[in-house]
Amino acid sequence: MIRVAVVGGGAAGFFFAANAGRAQGIGVEIFESAAKPMRKVLASGAGRCNLANSLEDIEGIISNYPRGGGFLRKVFRAFSPKDAVAWFERHGVKVKTLPSGKIFPEEESSALVAEALEREAVKNGAKISVNVCVSRIEKSAGGGFEVFGGNSKTGGENFFWRFDAVLLCCGGFKDGALRRSLEGLGHTVSELAPALYALKTSPRFPNLSGISVRGAMLTFKNENKRKAQGDLLFTFKGLSGPAVYKLTSFFAREFKRDGFKADFFADLMYSQGSERGVSEFFRSGRASFGARKILNLRPECIAEKLWLEILSLAQIPSDRVFAKLSSAEERRIAGYLTRMPFKSEAPDGGEVVTCGGIKNSEVDFSTMQSKIVKGLFFAGECLDIDGLTGGFNLQNAWCTARVAAAAISQKL
Ligand SMILES: Cc1cc2nc3c(=O)[nH]c(=O)nc-3n(C[C@H](O)[C@H](O)[C@H](O)COP(=O)(O)OP(=O)(O)OC[C@H]3O[C@@H](n4cnc5c(N)ncnc54)[C@H](O)[C@@H]3O)c2cc1C
């Protein structure tokens, strides 16, 4: 029997234990620092669990990982997101696919996903120890590993166990003893930063909370002129939606280095051709609706409340008729439509994954085994891999864990 310590009872840890156990000659013990395992799985997709994405073309899938996607090619060839979804269906979680490609349990319940994983892990003979924080992993003189830990409530390091192999799947890395221990074994943890969050902004428009703009483009004002395109959602404290998630994901490290402060502007008319779309709006408005009040005529992609806000920002009198708009007034409206300025102030919740982790080049992705320490395996978010919203993060956890399970089952 190969004894494997699983450090972290989250998505990857449980998928591993549900796929490797007694039948493969593997004895699994999961160490989880929280009182309840799989907290992130339960919280995922606001309790609905967007467990995967329906994209099947590998290049298309990996383009949704701002970091580490290329390393997942091998993993997805061995065990694809589609295979992961089929696994859940075989184990009692029927799924549905939304037009966006997001896959959810049919009953939109993350608890069903967690229950299936725990049931299979227990069936496979996994031992689950909660409230145990692993602080250190060391190579044992006689081969294998010594794993040190303590009660996560009382602190300290008062337990010690021997294992033949270790799967590290502790989720997003934090600075601390475990990180230092991995570095002591020769591994590198790349620069860490939160990714994939909404933004508190200035200005903010609480009255517009819930209003979205289809296909907006966000552009940094600095010399890099970095961009992110997608739907934009006004929130009580700032901005959210796919465009903001892309911005805070692709530029996660830049945001953190700058204390989350960045100047950017939103092109709300990007889906209508930006300036060209604005000119066309004014041209057809003047030609066909010259006598109409400007507040009663707006571009197709702009919701009524947002239009009123833009007219107020541009200081357009509410009774101005279309034909009487001055060119200076048109320019002010066009400015807010295509270059609405924002300053980000801080993250404002959201999916939140960690950018950064164990350096991918130190891992053999055909087995998920460390290239530096034989018998040490990695899976999930502890690697320098993170995806956009859409199920990409959980499918990273499932698929890397499954490849590790297969490799250990083959006694690698
Ligand atoms: C609110 C929210 C919603 C999300 N929604 C989605 C979604 O819908 N779809 C999607 O694809 N992704 C989603 N994600 C991201 C996704 O949940 C994670 O990427 C995924 O859970 C990572 O799996 P993991 O096993 O690597 O880490 P985790 O699931 O985070 O598990 C790691 C576990 O290790 C434990 N641990 C950490 N350190 C130690 C230690 N030293 N000793 C013992 N235990 C330790 C932690 O307590 C944790 O339980 C969401 C994330 C959040 C926060």
Image (cartoon, rainbow, N blue to C red):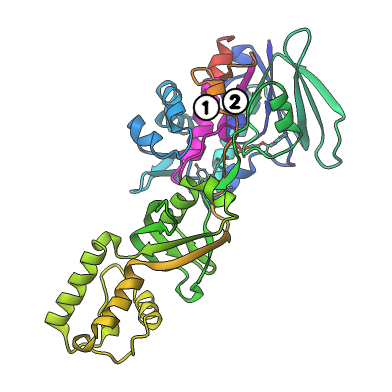
Q: Which mark is residue 346?
A: none
**Figure label count:** 2
Mark 1 neighbour density, 10 Å: few (under 14) some (14–19) many (20 or more): many
Q: Which residue is mark 1?
A: 400
Q: Which residues are magenta?
A: 376-404
Q: Secondary structure at mark 2?
A: strand
Residue at image point 84% right, 27% down: 159
Amino acid, disc 2: Phe
Residue under the point 55% across and 59% down: 261
Quarter of the image with the C terminus is top right
Q: Position of residue 201 (x, y in %)?
A: 52, 66
Q: Splitting the image into 4 quarters, where does residue 407 fall?
A: top right
Frontmost residue, 160 versus 338: 338
Please indicate whether residue 329 sits to the left or right of residue 234 in the image: left
Q: Amino acid at mark 1?
A: Thr
Reply above or below: 356 against 28.
below
Q: Closest to the observer: 355 or 349?
A: 355
Q: Which mark is residue 378?
A: 2
Which sits earlier in the primary sequence, circle 1 or circle 2?
A: 2
> Could you tell me which secondary element the residue under label 1 belongs to?
helix
For the question of whether residue 44 can be seen, the reply is: no
- Characterize the local packing of mark 2: few (<14), some (14-19) or many (20 or more) Cα atoms within 10 angstroms: many
Q: Is mark 2 within 8 Å of ligand 1?
A: no
| The quadrant where residue 217 appears | bottom left
Can you give x and y, in whole percent of width and height, for residue 408 in the image?
A: 59, 15
